[in-house]
Image (cartoon, helix red, strand yellow):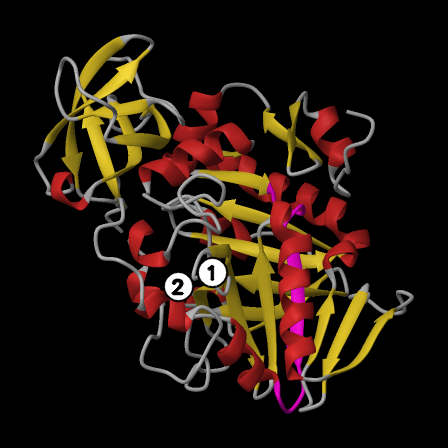
Amino acid sequence: MSDLRTTPLHDRHAALGASFTDFGGWSMPVRYTSDLAEHHAVRQAAGLFDISHMAEFTVSGTGSTAFLERVLAGRFAAMSIGKAKYSLLLSDAGGVIDDVIVYRLGDERYLVISNAGNRDAVFEAFRQRVATAGITAAVSLTPSNALPLDLQLSTNDGATIEDISDGVSLIAVQGPRARAILENTTGIDAITPAVVDLGYYAWSSGTFQGADLFIARTGYTGEDGFELLVPNAAAPALWDALLASGEPLGLVPAGLASRDTLRLEAGMPLHGHELSDRILPAQAGLGRVVASDKGDFVGKAALAEAPADLPVLVGLAAEGRRAGRAGYAVYAGAEGGDPVGEITSGALSPTLGHPIAMAFVPPALADIGTELFIDVRGTRIPATVTALPFYRRTA
């Protein structure tokens, strides 16, 4: 794995005994001790995740809101400063290049966080859309401040897009005790608004040991939690401080394996599985994310012309212990016939104790309660179409 990129926390993970895997070109911790133990810790107490492989872009200037309205499927003009919004970056054909979270930092300043493996695709999509708007600059910049700028694009209507990914680290604290852990972490100060007042899908600013700190009440586990963005140099000390604060409360370091089962239980899509540039938002149950009644945006025309009979994403629940996995075929009957769909993600649910999966099937087979069959290594296992998410936290 010598060609893989590593985060500023790699040495911390190695010292904790982590096993590593290739994830989007990064060497990332897949587990520290046990997938199940880490999963249960997040559901019952808290887990600490290094998600510094994610990509971050700032969009600022007088044309920033108009630019995001053109290039993303959501609506941002009425979005309040201090809030976050889940959105989609679409291709001209309406497929999902990536799903992103957009944070409004000011009247004309935003932070966009995208998936690690799609960093280049997102920046290229931005570049193409800047080109159609009238590009005035495309330059490499030398890091010069706490949040270094790596790549910059500017439009002739005043929007500047900056890729800051290489200069910052992202750490997630997820679980019912996440807020208590943050409130007791030594070195975190000057938070406005206070963590206790921070709503879901909102952000707060502060400092950690004098470094800029961005705290968002967002996550990818189905639990309450926070994602903390800091300059790379501050990341190891922040990781250590969070562990020290959280260990008495049950916090454990958690890897990608538990993150995947957590997000699956919560019915959250993963790009490359439930989302791709060949899948339209409505197919993945994300039609509500698209502001189809706003002005023109990339992909709008294609979505309006899409056929109504495309496969749609459903949840499947089964009994026993044998779980369908990504790529396994789905059938309409126990015997014979061609596959009617395919599993995109599946696992034996640690929380629920039975197999769960997401799959694309024809709309005629997508009604809740429909019985289907998953081919698990040559044996067809009955499964029932179930509402998503499979798991929802109660508080």
Q: Which residues are magenta?
A: 50-63
Q: Is residue 157 left or right of residue 66?
A: right
Q: Is residue 55 magenta?
A: yes
Query: Residue 72 versus residue 148: which sits nearer the camera?
Result: 72
Q: Earlier in the sequence, mark 2 or mark 1?
A: 2
Q: Is residue 341 above or below residue 131?
A: above
Q: Secondary structure at mark 1?
A: loop
* Residue 247 shown in magenta: no
Q: Which residue is mark 2?
A: 200
Residue 87 place in picture, x, y as percent? 44, 65
Secondary structure under tag 2 reads loop
Q: Residue at x 40, y 50 (%)?
A: 279
Question: Please, what is the three-letter code of the amino acid marked with disc 1?
Answer: Arg
Q: Are marks 2 and 1 in contact (CB under 8 Å)?
A: yes
Res. 358 image quadrant: top left
Residue 222 seen anywhere in this rendered image of the structure: yes
